[in-house]
């Protein structure tokens, strides 16, 4: 691994001592991510074919580091995007949208990505099981999205490239016919998407 790449990974993955500190927010804004659909956000920015292998290798190292921290990690876009899955049971009480005090233990290691809005876009989706009506499921998702936004707004340097979507019970991972199945469906997914700065570094051979 090159020195530049090693330093970049170390910077992104550092766990910052942010407790009790309210960082100033960046005045930069990402281009229209809040006006885009979820599918549009997940598909962009597009990685040029020539840079795809380098981006995938870089994201693979990020995935490996997160797995070592105890996260369940998957991928999409053939490895260009890393998905970090956190059970909502680890952060919220049942049918509640107030974060546990201990939720920061699961969220703090993700701050390095959210703090780098030119290097990463982070799409956050909040899912429920099928308990209650569809309107209840969506309302619960919306409340949890708002709670997560509030947490990141408090502790992150910038939330300019963080966008969230309440999903309710519309995309279950498992059938909702068992306790384990419902627990698997109650989750937050963080999609770590390489931004234009990472793509530019790959173009220069500096990733």
Image (tube, rainbow, N blue to C red):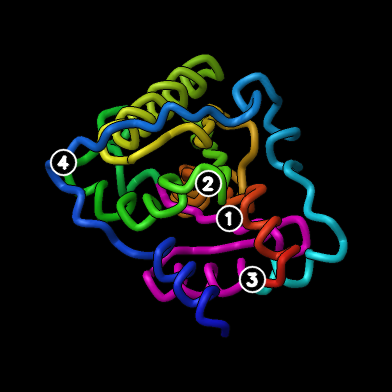
Badge 3 density bin: few <14, some 14–19, many ≥20, Cα 10 Å: some
Badge 2 density bin: few <14, some 14–19, many ≥20, Cα 10 Å: many
The segment highlighted magenta reads 58-87
Residue position marked by numbered label 4 in the rendering:
21
Say which mark, if any, is on residue 189.
2
Does 52 appear in magenta? no
Instruction: Determine the CA span between mark 4 and mark 1.
Output: 27 Å
Instruction: Determine the CA span between mark 4 and mark 3.
Output: 33 Å
Q: Are marks 1 and 2 in contact (CB under 8 Å)?
A: yes
Residue position marked by numbered label 3 in the rendering:
206
In this rendering, which labeled residue sits more in front, label 1 or label 3? 3
Instruction: Determine the CA span between mark 1 and mark 2.
Output: 6 Å
Outermost residue, bottom direction?
A: 1
Badge 4 density bin: few <14, some 14–19, many ≥20, Cα 10 Å: few
Q: Are marks 1 and 3 in contact (CB under 8 Å)?
A: no
- Secondary structure at badge 1 equals strand
Instruction: Determine the CA span between mark 1 and mark 3.
Output: 24 Å
- Secondary structure at badge 2 equals strand
Q: Earlier in the sequence, mark 1 or mark 2?
A: 1
In this rendering, which labeled residue sits more in front, label 4 or label 1? 4
> In the rendered picture of this protein, how many numbered marks are placed on residues?
4
């Amino acid at each position: 691994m090159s020195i530049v790449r090693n330093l970049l990974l170390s910077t992104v993955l550092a766990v910052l001592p942010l407790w009790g500190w309210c960082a100033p927010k960046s005045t930069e804004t990402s281009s229209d991510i809040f006006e885009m659909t979820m599918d549009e956000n997940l598909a962009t920015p597009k990685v040029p074919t020539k840079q795809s292998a380098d981006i995938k290798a870089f994201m693979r190292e990020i995935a490996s580091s997160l797995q070592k921290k105890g996260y369940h990690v998957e991928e999409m876009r053939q490895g260009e995007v890393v998905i970090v899955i956190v059970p909502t049971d680890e952060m919220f009480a049942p049918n509640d949208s107030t974060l546990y005090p201990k939720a920061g233990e699961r969220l703090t290691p993700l701050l390095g990505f959210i703090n780098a809005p030119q290097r990463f876009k982070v799409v956050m989706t909040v899912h429920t099981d099928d308990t209650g009506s569809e309107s209840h499921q969506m309302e619960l998702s919306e409340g949890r999205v708002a709670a997560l936004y509030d947490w990141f707004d408090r502790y992150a340097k910038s939330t300019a490239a963080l966008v969230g979507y309440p999903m309710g019970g519309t995309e279950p991972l498992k059938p909702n016919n068992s306790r384990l199945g419902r627990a698997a469906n109650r989750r937050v997914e963080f999609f770590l998407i390489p931004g234009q700065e990472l793509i530019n570094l790959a173009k220069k051979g500096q990733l």
